[in-house]
Image (spheres, helix red, strand yellow):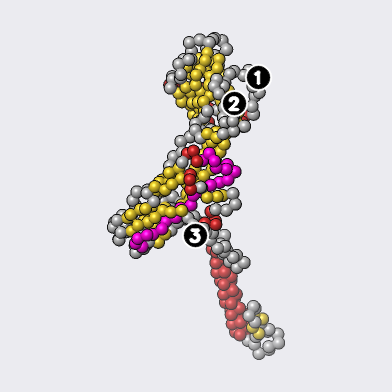
Amino acid sequence: MKQTISEITIETRSCNDCNSSHYSKSVTNFKQMKKIHILYFAMAFLLISVSCTKDPVVLEFDDSYTPKPPKKGALKEEPPVDLLTVYTYFQESQKDLVVNRVLQTDGSLEIKDEINNVEVQVKTTIPVEAATTFEVTLMENEDEAFPKIVKGLTVLLPEDVYNLENSTLDFKVGDKEVGNTIINLKKDAFKKLDKMKEYVLPLKIKITKGEAVILNYFVLHVTLQDVEALPEAPNVSPSYNFPTPSQDKVLRESALHVNSDYATGHLYKLTDSNLGSNWWVKPEEGHWLSIGIDNLQKIKAIVIKTPSWNNKNLKACDVDTPVNINHIKLTNFKGYDSFVDLMDLYLVIE
């Protein structure tokens, strides 16, 4: 009898002394092994069936991926602290100031806006354990951050444009913050600045008494915007041949914020696009109507719709030189009757 791994071969013809009992035993062994093979096959099929009930998840590792180094980000307003070290920092790292200047017909510049002083707050992360004094001062050329801030058309704000008030800050034991440093801005000094440049005022913290770790610096960015002055009043009269503007140049409805000292409960009728209702005003009594928009724009025209079936349409009015170029004020209304009716209005921008 020969036996291999995969099968059993029984040779009866070449073995004359093989008796029937030997043959039966061989056949029995073959049947037993056949049953074992069938059992093994059934178990394998069962395992395969169970393992295939769900799609396998293959996890592959891409060894060609190279992680990028983290980018240097801006300091958060609340820096990380420990309980042993006193850190000091500016509450805000920067502020932006836009100064609107009005170019007069004679070439001179006027500043109609009020320029508010800027407050700068210095804090510590934990209360100081000893009396500490900080000095808010102008950043110097040798400071590491200076060449990153003052470069190209970005120049230092001239010293005659501002002064620092309360620049010395005394922290007593237990203090985390005290009074603010004030940047006082001189309105008339902005007239001589070059509108083609951006001006910056970089400030730093110096420790003159005590110990602390300084975390950041402060920069005031100043931008100048020049607008042409309107002609002297009366400077508005009806125009009946104004071309229809493209819709992307029109500001109306929710884009406008209207206000007045007269009939305020009916102001919404100016911006609801309903020509069947109107806001009204008494002429020659000094009443005003203001129109505000969200962003600074150069206004090309104010389009006002008035009724054509009565004498309550607008004859003329004055547009005051805007306090800001995102705010227009109409005054000195003139009409043909005891009231002037305005049904709708919108602005056309360039």
| Three-letter code for the amino acid on which mark 3 is drawn | Asp
Return the x and y of residue 40 as percentages of the image width and height.
Answer: 57, 72
Residue at mark 3: 143
Region rendered in magenta: 190-211
Mark 1 → mark 3, Cα distance in angstroms: 61 Å
**In whole angstroms, how far apart are the C-alphas of marks 3 and 2?**
50 Å
Q: Residue 153: x and y, percent?
A: 59, 49
Q: Residue 256, relative to residue 280: is it above or below?
A: below
Q: What amino acid does circle 1 point to?
A: Asn
Q: Quadrant of residue 349?
A: top right
Label 1 vs 3, first from the N-terminus: 3
The numbered mark, 2 or 1, whose residue comes first in the sequence reads 1
**287 shown above or below 249:** above
Measured as percent of width and height from the top left, residue 263 is found at: 43, 19
Whole-percent x, y for residue 315 in the image: 55, 15
Q: Secondary structure at mark 1?
A: loop
For residue 241, the mark is 1
Find disc 2 in the rendering and name its residue: 301
Q: Amino acid at mark 2?
A: Ala
Task: Give the Cα separation between the discs numbered 2 and 1.
Answer: 12 Å
- Which sits earlier in the primary sequence, circle 3 or circle 2? 3
Residue at image position (57%, 36%) is 226
Which residue is more in the foreground, 145 or 104?
Answer: 104
Residue at (68%, 88%) from the top-left corner? 15
Q: Is residue 201 magenta?
A: yes
Q: Residues within 10 Å of mark 2 (few under 14, many from 20)?
A: few
Front residue of 17 and 144: 144
As for residue 270 lying within the magenta part, the answer is no
**For the residues carrying marks 1 and 3, which lies nearer the camera in this image?**
3
Number of marks drawn = 3
